[in-house]
Amino acid sequence: MLHGASPRKEAGNDEFEKMCGQLAEQGYYTEFIEYYSQTPVVGANDPSGIRKNFPVWLAEIHSGIDELGKNRQGAVDPHRIALLGFSLGAYLSLSSGAVDPGQIAAIVEYYGGLPPTLSGGAKTMPPTLILHGDKDVLVSVAEAHSLDELLTAANRPHEMHIYEGANHASTSGASVLVQRRRRARRVESHPEIPRDKSEKCGFKKRRRRCSIKVAFQASLVSAGCYCAFDCFG
C-alpha cells in the first residue's frame, strides 16, 4: 500500500493502518510502505521535487518486492503481489507495473495516472483497477480516461470506475474492495443468494459488473525501505 504526496512524513498513517486492518480481516497480508524514508517529504505542489525523487521511490518499492523472494515463512506468494496506491502512490504503482510487470500481479490505483514517458509500458501492464472522481481538482479525471484508453488499445485487462461528484481523495479507500470481497464470499458460500443489482458498476464510463479479481496478497518487505506497519489476516 503506497501513500500519496504529503507535507510531512507519516501523515495519514492512522487511516492507512485502518485500511490495512480491513484487508487483513479478509485474509490478506498487507503492508504499508513509507517511501519517503530515503528522501525529503515532497508535497503535491512540488512537481520538480516529485520528478527528482521519483526514481528513488521506484527503486525503494522494487527493492521491497525483490525481498519477497527471501520470505522464509512462506506467508506471501511472490507471484501474487499487488500494489494499491493513492494519488502519488498510484502514479508509483502504475509506473512500477509499466517498468517491471513481471513483479506485480495486479494494480489498484486511486486518483493517479501513468506518466506519459512510460505509456509504452501499457502493453504489458498487469490487471488494473482505475478509481477516480470526476470532480478531482488535483489530479484531473482525464488521467483516468487516458490510462483507460492506453490499456484498451493494448488489450490489457482492466476496469475503470468514475465516481460522480467526487473530489481528490474522497473515495473510500480499501473499504470498497473489502465490501466487494465480503459480498463475493457470501455468494460463493450461498449460491441461492441473488446478486444485488446495486453491485453493478453504475458509474460514468462503464456499466458492467464489478468482476475484477485483485490478487491482493500485497507485501513490500523492508529492503532499503521503511515499512511503517503490516497487518496479518
Image (cartoon, rainbow, N blue to C red):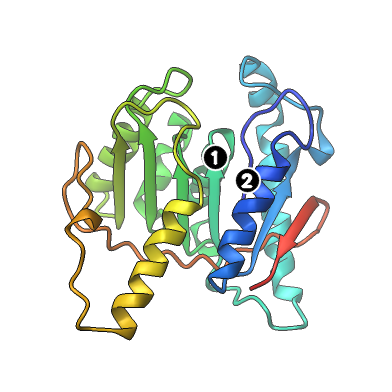
Q: CA distance from mark 1 to mark 2?
A: 6 Å
The answer to whether 196 appears left or right of 156 in the picture is left
Q: Residue at x 30, y 45 (%)?
A: 160
For residue 155, which quarter of the picture? Answer: bottom left
Q: Give the percent coordinates (x, y) of residue 173.
A: 50, 46
Horizontal placement of 232 versus 193: left or right? right
Q: Amino acid at mark 2?
A: Leu
Which comes before the other along the chain, label 1 or label 2?
2
Mark 1 nearby-residue class (10 Å; few <14, some 14–19, many ≥20): many
Disc 2 secondary structure class: loop
Q: Amino acid at mark 1?
A: Phe
Q: Which mark is residue 210?
A: none
The image quarter in which residue 43 lies: top right
Query: Badge 2 local density, few (<14 within 10 Å), some, or many (20+)?
Result: many
Could you tell me which quadrant the C terminus lies in? Answer: bottom right
Q: CB atoms at circles 1 and 2 under 8 Å apart?
A: yes
- Tell me where residue 105 appears, x and y as whole percent: 48, 64
| Residue at the disc numbered 2 | 2
User: Would residue 120 be found to the left or right of residue 155 on screen?
Assistant: right
**Circle 1 residue:** 86
| Front one among 105 and 178 | 178
Which residue is depicted at the point 17% across and 58% down? 197
Q: What's the residue at 60%, 73% (across, down)?
A: 78
Instruction: Give the vertical position of 149 relative to 26 (above or below).
Output: above
Q: Choose between 108 and 179: the one closer to the eye.
A: 179
On the image, the x and y values in percent for residue 102 come to 51, 63
Asked if residue 134 is positioned above or below residue 15 in the image, the reply reads: above
Give percent across and percent down for residue 23: 56, 63
